[in-house]
Image (cartoon, helix red, strand yellow):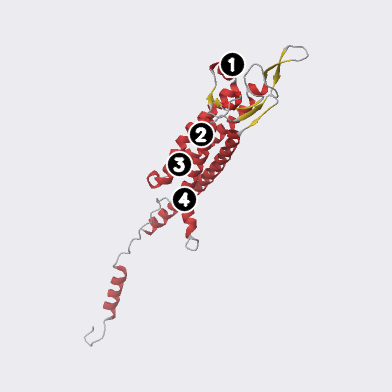
């Protein structure tokens, strides 16, 4: 105050200026942009909570889908009713019925007229004559084995993504590997259907004595079509296709969100850097 009891204007202005400019502005902390969300799915507060729950459940759904498809593929590979061969008559060179089923690695007892029982392994003589020299048979067997080997490896990875997801971040490389293996399984499962082109279906290997001339003639089978395991292979093929589409969509969505996130991070760093 002045001697007369008033307020010194210069002193008040000095205090106000000191209070305004003497304090340093507080630094604003940068948000953590390195945190990864499940499937990179972001929802605002107006959207329903069940959408977030579905997004978190997607890895489990994919793992269940792969489990069902792989179980079907395993049953197809180990079964003995992949195709039905209709010769049209009872051949003389093999003790089989006119119509019988065949599997990739075994055949049913009904093929030789027996009733019931488990799948039987092909005899060595039959293997040497009809299987070892047939590239389509060998190729379909190899394809089924590759489906199983890659399937069980990808199944472990799929369930790790579903159960141990927080420990596998970032998930982008794991999803890319899973999508690649699922695509190969889809391809190899398709190649199993070349079993319809084995020599027993396409070549003249079935013998019968002609009633008119008495000579032994060779004939081609009337038809070959898919049987029980063959239809199950179609089911597993569809499941692999759905899985590949789901993984590719998730992979593309995650890559796009990753790019947007990286661009936002760079912009935020420049913004907060200028403020500091």
The answer to which of marks 1 and 2 sits earlier in the sequence is 2
Q: Residues within 10 Å of mark 3 (few under 14, many from 20)?
A: many
**Which of label 1 and label 4 is nearer to you?**
1
Which residue was labeled with disc 2? 74
**13, 260: nearer the viewer:** 260
Q: Residue furthest right?
A: 212
Residue 22, above or below 40: below
Q: Quadrant of the N terminus?
A: bottom left
Q: Residues within 10 Å of mark 4 (few under 14, many from 20)?
A: some
The answer to which of marks 1 and 3 sits earlier in the sequence is 1
**Which of label 1 and label 3 is nearer to you?**
1
Looking at the image, residue 167 sits to the left or right of residue 116; the answer is: left
Q: CA distance from mark 1 to mark 4?
A: 51 Å
Q: Tag 3's secondary structure?
A: helix
The answer to which of marks 3 and 2 sits earlier in the sequence is 2
Residue drawn at x 54%, y 19% is 123
**Which of label 3 and label 2 is nearer to you?**
2
Q: CA distance from mark 1 to mark 2?
A: 27 Å
The answer to which of marks 2 and 4 sits earlier in the sequence is 4
């Amino acid at each position: 105050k002045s001697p007369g009891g008033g307020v010194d204007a210069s002193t008040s202005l000095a205090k106000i200026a000191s209070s305004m400019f003497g304090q340093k502005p507080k630094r604003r902390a940068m948000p953590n942009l390195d945190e990864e969300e499940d499937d990179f799915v972001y929802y605002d507060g107006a959207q329903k909570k069940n959408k977030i729950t579905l997004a978190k459940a997607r890895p489990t759904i994919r793992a269940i889908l792969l489990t069902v498809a792989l179980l079907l593929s395993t049953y197809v590979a180990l079964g003995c009713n992949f195709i039905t061969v209709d010769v049209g008559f009872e051949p003389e060179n093999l003790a089989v019925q006119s119509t019988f089923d065949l599997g990739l690695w075994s055949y049913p007892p009904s093929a030789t007229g027996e009733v019931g029982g488990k799948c039987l392994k092909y005899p060595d003589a039959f293997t040497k004559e009809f299987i070892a020299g047939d590239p389509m048979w060998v190729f379909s067997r190899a394809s089924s084995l590759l489906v199983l080997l890659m399937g069980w490896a990808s199944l472990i990875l799929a369930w790790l993504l579903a159960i141990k997801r927080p420990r596998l971040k970032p998930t982008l490389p794991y999803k890319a590997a899973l999508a690649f293996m699922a695509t190969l399984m889809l391809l190899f499962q398709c190649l199993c259907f070349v079993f319809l082109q084995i020599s027993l279906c396409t070549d003249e290997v079935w013998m019968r004595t002609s009633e008119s001339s008495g000579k032994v003639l060779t004939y081609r089978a009337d038809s070959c079509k898919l049987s029980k395991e063959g239809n199950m292979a179609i089911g597993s093929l569809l499941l692999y296709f759905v899985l590949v589409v789901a993984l590719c969509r998730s992979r593309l969505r995650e890559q796009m969100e990753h790019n947007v996130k990286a661009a936002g991070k760079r912009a935020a760093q420049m913004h907060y850097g200028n403020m500091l």
